[in-house]
């Protein structure tokens, strides 16, 4: 029988010795300061067995991985009407690109590029103050993980706000098309704070369990989303979760996955495992270099690719 624990330990050992670790994001100080040698891996199997290695308990900035939780929440609020305001196609462009918005009526290609995630934040904001909307996303992440020790890193949120000129440009541009319903500062406030949520690999893998289990959170026994919606969120993660590196990720790993510039990746092997990996060095597309390699190894050893 495949010993997943041994595989996880082997991978952590190999990754510790790799020198090709990519470059840590440096657009804000709190990310630039993170040691590129850090590495964490958490694998939670469908029966709940949890395997941890390296810095799997260390909180890091989940950044764009939060877009999965925000999307799930927004779909719960407005259902498929969300797709009138956000597309479902890979963009083939950088995560913060603005170009397609001009010819596509301010409708972002998908909910995982920055523009799409900002629209999703705008949907979560509806009927709330920004602080309440951030609280709702945070409570949702805590409920999915079944743990309360998950926080917004206010230093990261402030730095995002101070440097987020491109995100402000995206938001203003979409507002000009009528695709943001709230003042841009409010919507961006929600977006910046959700990006600043800090979680450990273990917490992130716990939070992703509903995507491996047909929409059910095993912590509560309740459905977070329907099985059909879980399948669709997984499909979007596979096709769009790594931006213009999504094809490469599908080719090498073959799992649905969502990356963040903090170096985290949440990956899902439906029916088998929820996986979180963290290594802060990024490749040229802004996705974790060693994190991707670790997932590639995991899939080679377990055969968990969906293909
Ligand atoms: O909005 C931004 O640009 C960052 N706060 C998050 C982007 C991100 O994580 C993209 N991931 N690779």
Image (tube, rainbow, N blue to C red):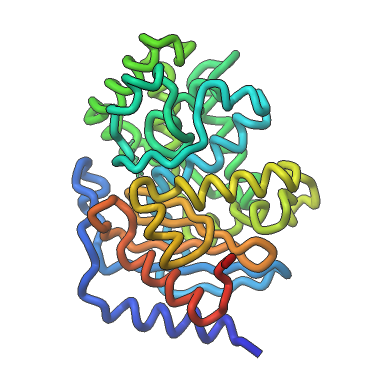
Residue 246 placed where, x, y %? 40, 52
* Image point (68%, 42%), residue name: 229
Residue occupying the point 34% across, 63% down:
279
Is 40 left or right of 211, judged from the image as shown? left
Q: Which quarter of the rendered picture does the N terminus lie within? A: bottom right
Looking at the image, residue 134 sits to the left or right of residue 23; the answer is right
Q: Is residue 65 above or below residue 83?
A: below
Q: Give the x, y percent position of residue 97.
A: 29, 33
Seen from the viewer's position, the closer of residues 181 and 178 is 178
Image quarter where the C terminus lies is bottom right
The quarter of the displayed image where residue 83 is located: top right
Q: In this view, does 121 lie above or below 257?
A: above
Q: Residue at x 57, y 49 (%)?
A: 235
Q: Which residue is outermost to the right?
A: 221
Judge whether 158 appears above or below 43 on screen. above
In the rendered image, the residue lying farthest to the front is 103
User: Is residue 34 placed above or below 100 in the rendered structure?
Assistant: below
Q: How many marks?
A: 0
* Any part of residue 241 in sight: yes
The percent coordinates of residue 189 (x first, y second) are 40, 24
Farthest residue in the bottom direction? 1
| Nearer the observer, 98 or 131 | 98
| Residue 77 visible within the image | no
Residue drawn at x 79%, y 47% is 222
Q: In the depicted view, which residue is nearer to us: 277 or 33?
A: 277
**Residue 66, x across and y down, in percent:** 48, 42
Ligand 1's quadrant is: top left
């Amino acid at each position: 029988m495949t010993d997943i624990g041994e595989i996880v330990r082997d991978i952590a050992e190999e990754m510790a010795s790799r020198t090709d670790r990519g470059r840590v994001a440096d657009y804000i100080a709190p990310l630039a300061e993170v040691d590129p040698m850090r590495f964490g891996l958490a694998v939670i199997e469908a029966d709940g067995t949890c395997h941890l290695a390296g810095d799997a308990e260390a909180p890091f900035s989940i950044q764009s991985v939060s877009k999965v939780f925000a999307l799930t929440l927004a779909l719960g609020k407005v259902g498929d009407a969300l797709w009138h305001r956000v597309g479902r196609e890979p963009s083939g462009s950088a995560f913060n690109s603005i170009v397609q918005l001009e010819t596509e009526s301010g409708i972002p290609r998908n909910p995982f590029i920055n523009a799409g995630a900002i629209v999703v934040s705008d949907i979560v904001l509806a009927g709330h103050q920004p602080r309440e909307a951030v609280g709702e996303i945070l409570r949702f992440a805590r409920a999915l993980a079944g743990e309360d020790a998950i926080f917004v890193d206010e230093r990261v949120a402030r730095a995002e706000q101070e440097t987020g000129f491109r995100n402000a440009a995206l938001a203003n541009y979409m507002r000009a098309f009528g695709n943001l319903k709230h003042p841009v500062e409010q919507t961006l406030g929600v977006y910046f704070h959700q990006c600043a949520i800090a979680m450990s690999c273990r917490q992130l893998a716990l939070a992703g369990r509903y995507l491996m289990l047909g929409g059910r959170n095993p912590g509560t026994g309740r459905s977070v989303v329907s099985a059909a919606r879980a399948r669709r969120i997984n499909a979007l993660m596979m096709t769009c979760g790594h931006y213009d590196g999504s094809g490469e990720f599908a080719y090498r790993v073959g799992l649905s996955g969502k990356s963040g510039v903090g170096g985290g990746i949440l990956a899902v092997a439906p029916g088998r495992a929820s996986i979180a990996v963290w290594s802060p060095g990024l490749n040229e597309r802004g996705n974790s270099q060693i994190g991707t390699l670790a997932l590639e190894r995991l899939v080679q050893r377990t055969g968990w690719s969906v293909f």
